Amino acid sequence: MPFWNQKKDEKIYSKYEFKEVLGTGAFSEVTLAEEKETKTMYAVKCIDKKSIRGKEESLQNEISVLRRLKHKNIVQLVEVYDEKCTVYLVMELVTGGELFDRIVQKGSYTEKDASDLIKQVLEAVDFMHEQGVVHRDLKPENLLYYSNSEDSKIMISDFGLSKVEGSGSMDTACGTPGYVAPEVLRRKPYGKEVDVWSIGVIAYILLCGYPPFYDENDAELFRQIMAAKYEFDSPYWDEISDSAKDFISHLICLDRKYRYDCQQALQHPWISGNTALDKDIH
Ligand code: ADP
Ligand code: MG
């Protein structure tokens, strides 16, 4: 049967009208779709079953995880269609674009703005951790603004790699180099602490515009990460508050015993107090 006829037969097409493609990932395409009856727009992640052969477990994880997570800063999974060749995840639509695109466009940007963003991410991730879920792939591309309004909230998306704690070993090396914690690279068993590390890396970039760990050579990059070798370089960090640096030092912290958990991070004065500066930083 030709591909297009196969598609027409699928149940999802009777309820949703597919519009333009919003984004493409490694195993999937995300498409805008209108629910015919209500005229409500959704984002539908279309996953070709052929391309995930052998990785079905990871997809089932994403589905079961998303179903359980209802939080104002987490993209909500609405329903799932498991058709012959494709799995469709109907998700809440977010329209504000990726985190860094917005910041680059924005004329002014302060420590307070960064602190507000990181607070929302910490609240969502703290909620996930309470549910026994570790995201494992927190990075700027997976942080999307809910809307185009200036004060839009930020949303965590893309749980393709997340895994429910306790449902198996969590020692698969995954995530994106640059954002992953040392214990992931060492292939040691790991847990929630890896997300806090990644949030630290994101906070670092939000404040200075470049990543704490970088090398064109992956082996060298891994070496830097495993030694937690990063600096608050002059002159880029000269104007940044000591409180911000103290905060980051507790997140990008090699020793997992000393690394903050989300609760501790939320209580740091740079997040919960008023030590984040209101001065423009770029
Ligand atoms: P992958 O696992 O393949 O990386 P993602 O879930 O990250 O897939 O989605 C790929 C892209 O699709 C995103 O970078 C984003 O541009 C777009 N996208 C994903 N989810 C949504 C959504 N809920 N609303 C709007 N756009 C989305
Ligand atoms: Mg993604």
Image (spheres, rainbow, N blue to C red):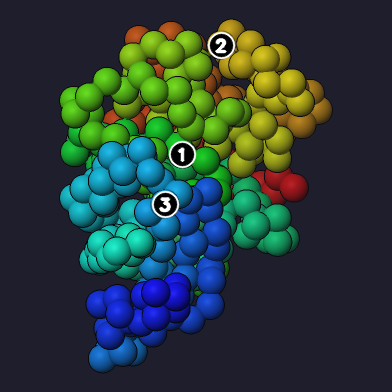
Q: Which label sits on residue 138?
A: 1
Q: Nearer the viewer, mark 3 or mark 1?
A: 3
Q: Secondary structure at mark 1?
A: loop
Q: Secondary structure at mark 2?
A: helix
Circle 2: residue type: Met
Circle 3: residue type: Lys
Question: Would you place residue 254 above or below residue 273 in this image?
Answer: above
Q: Nearer the viewer, mark 3 or mark 2?
A: 3
Q: Which label sits on residue 50?
A: 3
On the picture, is 28 further left or further right than 14? Answer: right
x and y, in percent, of residue 134 in the image: 31, 33
Q: Secondary structure at mark 3?
A: helix
Other-residue count near label 3 (Cα within 10 Å), few / some / many at <14 / 14–19 / ≥20? few
What residue appears at the point 49 percent right and 62 percent down from the top-left corner? 29
> Which of disc 2 and disc 3 is earlier in sequence?
3
Q: Tell me the quarter of the picture where residue 102 sits.
A: bottom right
Residue lying at the far front in this picture: please name it.
1
82 or 76: nearer the eye? 82
x and y, in percent, of residue 47 in the image: 40, 57
How far, Cα to Cα, is label 3 from label 1? 26 Å
Q: Which label sits on residue 269?
A: none
> Which of disc 1 and disc 3 is earlier in sequence?
3
Is residue 28 visible in the rendered image? The answer is yes
x and y, in percent, of residue 268 in the image: 40, 30
Q: Are marks 1 and 2 in contact (CB under 8 Å)?
A: no
Q: Which label sits on residue 226?
A: 2
On the picture, is 188 further left or further right than 177? Answer: left
On the picture, is 83 further left or further right than 237? Answer: left
On the picture, is 21 further left or further right than 160? Answer: right
Circle 1: residue type: Leu
Question: Would you place residue 52 above or below residue 41 in this image?
Answer: above
Other-residue count near label 2 (Cα within 10 Å), few / some / many at <14 / 14–19 / ≥20? some
